[in-house]
Image (cartoon, rainbow, N blue to C red):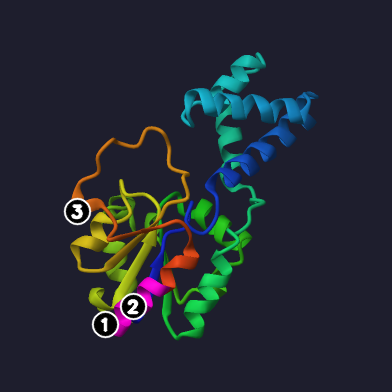
Amino acid sequence: MKAVLFDLDNTLYSEIEFVKSGFRAVARYLSSTYNFNADFLFTQMFDILQRDGRGKVFDSLLYNLDIYTEERVKLLVYLYRSHRPNIYLYNDALLTLNQMKHHDLRLGLVTDGMASVQRNKLAALSLESLFDIIICTDELGRECWKPSTVPYKIALDLLQVSPLEAVYVGDDPTKDFLAPNSIGMLTIQVNRQTLPNSMPDTIPETANARFVVNGLGEIFSIIRGNYDAS
């Protein structure tokens, strides 16, 4: 193998920590503007998230506070999306990335989500210098979000490797592995038990990763084994 592509959210860091960081940014604004207790606001948002999911957290919060307007919802969404997040890599992430680089593997990242949000995450995690190529699929167009094959092919072209020489490491079998499987990449799922309860009961075989591990520390032996066998 010559290259390893990684997912970002819940693969290299915990996405719920980004959500909490965004809620704290919103809570600070509402606290300073309307004199609500910031800890109370954070707890309210997190309770709404756990009860109702992400879709209407800020709507519900503002209704509960009796200060709802559509403009305020848009303001809170803006604050959430544009804030500089307080997030950290998983303990095994930096060690694994450095191990890959030490063995001259080319590193890429393919991540979904609003591009500006993902770029803020990458900056907060100081990841730009560790990767040879970073593809935010949103910058290619919404139609190129996973499970499109386009971002994977672009990443491999830029790294100058073939699909058979590359690995994709992600966490979510509903979208991460279908495309790289279809073009012949080796796929590895990191199962950190972070996926939502809304996951389908069955995943098509074509969408499953070839290997499933519990942490990033396990993937190098898989990659090395496939490299030695090739």
The span from disc 2 to disc 1 (Cα, nearest Å) is 6 Å
**Picture coordinates of residue 216, whole percent (x, y):** 48, 64
Q: Name which residue lies at 57% across and 69% down.
A: 94
- Evaluate whether residue 213 shows in this view: yes
**136 relative position to 146: left or right:** right
The N terminus sits in image quarter: bottom left
Residue at (31, 74) in percent of width and height = 166
Determine whether the residue tagged by mark 2 lies in a helix, strand or loop. helix
Residue 121: x and y, percent? 56, 56
Magenta span of residues: 221-228
User: Residue 229 got which mark?
Assistant: 1
Residue located beneath label 3 in the image = 206
Among the 4 quarters of the image, the one containing residue 167: bottom left
Numbered mark located on residue 225 in the image: 2
Q: Where is residue 139 in the image (x, y as percent from the top left)?
A: 39, 58
What amino acid type is highlighted by mark number 1? Answer: Ala
In the structure shown, which secondary structural element does the residue marked by tag 1 occupy?
helix
Question: Is most of the magenta stretch helix, strand or loop?
Answer: helix
Q: Is residue 202 left or right of residue 123?
A: left
Give the foreground label among 1 and 3: 1
Identity of the residue drawn at 36% across and 71% down: 222
Q: Are marks 2 and 1 in contact (CB under 8 Å)?
A: yes
Above or below for 122 versus 73: below
Is residue 115 shown in magenta?
no
Magenta stretch containing residue 222, yes or no?
yes
Q: Quadrant of the C terminus?
A: bottom left
| Amino acid type assigned to the residue bearing label 2 in the image | Gly
Q: Which label's residue is closer to the chain start, 1 or 3?
A: 3
Between residues 168 and 33, which one lies in front from this camera angle? 168
Q: Which of disc 2 and disc 3 is earlier in sequence?
A: 3
How packed mark 2 is, by other alpha carbons closer than 10 Å (few <14, some 14-19, many 20 or more), is few
* Residue kind at label 3, given as amino acid type: Thr
